[in-house]
């Protein structure tokens, strides 16, 4: 498969707009599933396989699973350094630990919609949690991709937010942008998974706090820049955007686009 340099493409996210949406029988509701995982954990491969399956075919009708594979770094000390690990993801898991009043952190852990958690390899429980999250009222997130002619190395991102659900009013919300990559194959050579070939789906390559939204009803906007690494396979890249309550950590609006099909890969 050809590895494409980011320098030969010009792509930008012209806008990401949000408006209130209440799920119904016809709507397809995006649900964020964060999988806290590690290539050094022998219990994680089944969870990563399940994440790949759920991302391809949702276990719940009317729900689209958006996977975020967050590789923690605390397993790195036992013989294998996970190339996708990031201490910031370990910190994010500790944030959820406090939210759930849990005694400790563990892998593989799935956090659904910022409010519910379960063992990431437990397909039945994860399906139930996805179904519950899919019934919550959410903002509708739209992501538009357009060229940025004068900045081929950077990707300009502007986000416009109109109206959050009534239940979300009066809070402060983080607007988070994640760049993820699929089909990342690693031949693990040490640690608990020595000799195992692991394939990652929705592996988070870049995590950006794009801005915050307040309690105002009128449209609000934030902007940021994204730089894509030339080693990434751009045809496997997704751009994920979501809004998350600073108070409850509920994710009340999300979406993702495939960079290639969205028109962001033009020579």
Image: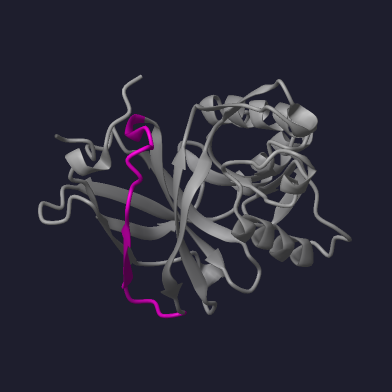
Residue at coordinates 63% horizontally, 58% vertically from top-left?
87
- Report if residue 85 lies within the magenta region: no
Location of the C terminus (image quadrant): top left
Instruction: Look at the image and say whether residue 219 sits in the magenta stretch.
Output: yes
State the quadrant of the N terminus. Answer: top left
* Image position, residue 82 (x, y; %): 64, 41
Residue 216 falls in which quadrant of the image? bottom left
Instruction: Give whichever of 213, 49 is nearer the camera.
Output: 49
In the figure, is residue 99 to the left or right of 61?
A: right
The part of the image, by quadrant, that contains residue 51 is top right
184 on left or right of 59: left
- Residue 241 location in percent, x, y? 43, 53
In this picture the colour scheme is: one colour
Q: Which residues are magenta?
A: 215-235
Report the residue at 33% width, 76% height from top: 218
Which residue is situated farthest in the left direction here?
149
Q: Is residue 242 above or below residue 61?
A: below
| Farthest residue, direction right | 103
């Amino acid at each position: 498969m050809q590895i494409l340099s980011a320098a030969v493409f010009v792509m930008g996210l012209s806008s990401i707009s949000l408006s209130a949406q209440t799920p119904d029988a016809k709507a397809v509701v995006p649900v964020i599933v964060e999988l806290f995982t590690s290539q050094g954990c022998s219990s994680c491969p089944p969870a990563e396989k399940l994440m790949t399956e759920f991302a391809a075919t949702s276990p719940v009708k009317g729900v689209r699973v958006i996977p975020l594979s967050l590789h923690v770094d605390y397993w790195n000390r036992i013989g294998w350094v996970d190339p996708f690990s990031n201490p910031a993801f370990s910190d994010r898991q500790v944030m959820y630990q406090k939210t759930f009043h849990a005694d400790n952190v563990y892998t593989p852990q799935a956090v659904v919609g910022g409010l519910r958690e379960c063992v990431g390899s437990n397909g039945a429980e994860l399906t139930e949690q996805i179904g519950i999250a899919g019934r919550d009222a959410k903002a509708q997130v739209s992501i538009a991709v357009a060229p940025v002619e004068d900045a081929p190395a950077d990707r300009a991102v502007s986000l416009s937010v109109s109206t959050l659900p009534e239940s979300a009013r009066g809070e402060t919300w983080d607007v988070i942008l994640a760049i993820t990559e699929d089909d990342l194959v690693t031949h693990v050579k040490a640690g608990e998974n020595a000799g195992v070939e692991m394939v990652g789906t929705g592996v988070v390559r870049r995590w950006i706090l794009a801005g915050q939204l307040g309690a105002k009803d009128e449209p609000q906007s934030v902007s940021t820049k994204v730089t894509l690494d030339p080693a990434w396979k751009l045809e496997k890249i997704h751009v994920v955007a979501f809004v998350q309550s600073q108070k409850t950590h509920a994710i009340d609006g999300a979406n993702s686009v495939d960079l290639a099909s969205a028109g962001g890969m033009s020579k």
